[in-house]
Amino acid sequence: QVQLVESGGGLVQAGGSLRLSCAASERSFSRYTMGWFRQAPGKEREFVGAISRGGGSTWYTDSVKGRFTISRDNAKNTVYLQMNSLKPEDTAVYSCATYWSGSYYSPEGYNNWGQGTQVTVSS
């Protein structure tokens, strides 16, 4: 089972930027489409974006398009989430996951999850 560890979260002012990283434990990392999700207090887990195995395709939820960018470095077994122009409503715990089957946009399509990293955006 792939182990995923997120890092890079923190407190940032509105309009600022953060770069999250998700490091995987396996060399077979390149076989997985990877997703980023977030969960704010009292809310359901929400799809943020995903990236294909080779990095050639990405998908985003509408609220982050143009502000967030997902990339990956398969040589480092790491996927990144660059977040720019952050807003207070982006405050959440961000988690990465390996895609398994079904919809890229549903957390049910993912079967390995990291522990998450907290992102807090102050106004």
Image (tube, helix red, strand yellow):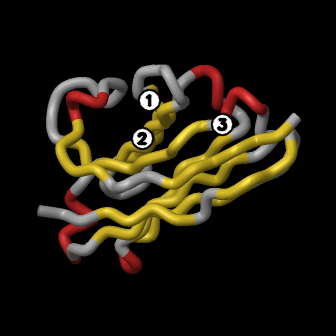
Picture residue at 19% right of the left edge, 70% below the top: 28
Tell me, for residue 117, which label it has, or none: none
Q: Amino acid at mark 3?
A: Thr
Query: Could you say whether the residue bearing mark 2 is in a helix, strand or loop?
Result: strand
* Label total for image: 3
Rounded to the nearest whole Å, what is the CA distance between mark 2 and mark 3?
A: 19 Å
51 vs 37, nearest the viewer: 37
Eye-nearest disc, 2 or 3? 3
The reply to whether callout 3 and callout 1 are in contact (CB within 8 Å) is: no
**From the viewer's perspective, is 49 left or right of 83?**
left
Query: Could you say whether the residue bearing mark 1 is in a helix, strand or loop?
Result: strand
Which residue is label 1 attached to? Answer: 47
Picture residue at 26% right of the left edge, 24% below the top: 103
Rounded to the nearest whole Å, what is the CA distance between mark 1 and mark 2?
A: 8 Å
Which residue is label 3 attached to? Answer: 91
Among the two numbered marks 2 and 3 on one chain, the one whose residue lies closer to the N terminus: 2
41 shown above or below 24: above
Quadrant in the picture for the C terminus: top right
The reply to whether callout 1 and callout 2 are in contact (CB within 8 Å) is: yes
Query: Could you say whether the residue bearing mark 3 is in a helix, strand or loop?
Result: loop
Across and down, in percent, residue 86 comes to: 77, 40
19 shown above or below 104: below
97 vs 115, nearest the viewer: 115
Picture residue at 15% right of the left edge, 33% below the top: 101
Q: Amino acid at mark 2?
A: Ala
Q: Amino acid at mark 1?
A: Phe
Which residue is label 2 attached to? Answer: 50
Query: Alpha-carbon neighbours of circle 2 within 10 Å: few (<14), some, or many (≥20)?
Result: many
Q: Looking at the rendering, which quadrant does residue 44 occupy?
A: top left
Quadrant in the picture for the N terminus: bottom left
Q: Looking at the rendering, which quadrant does residue 31 occupy?
A: bottom left
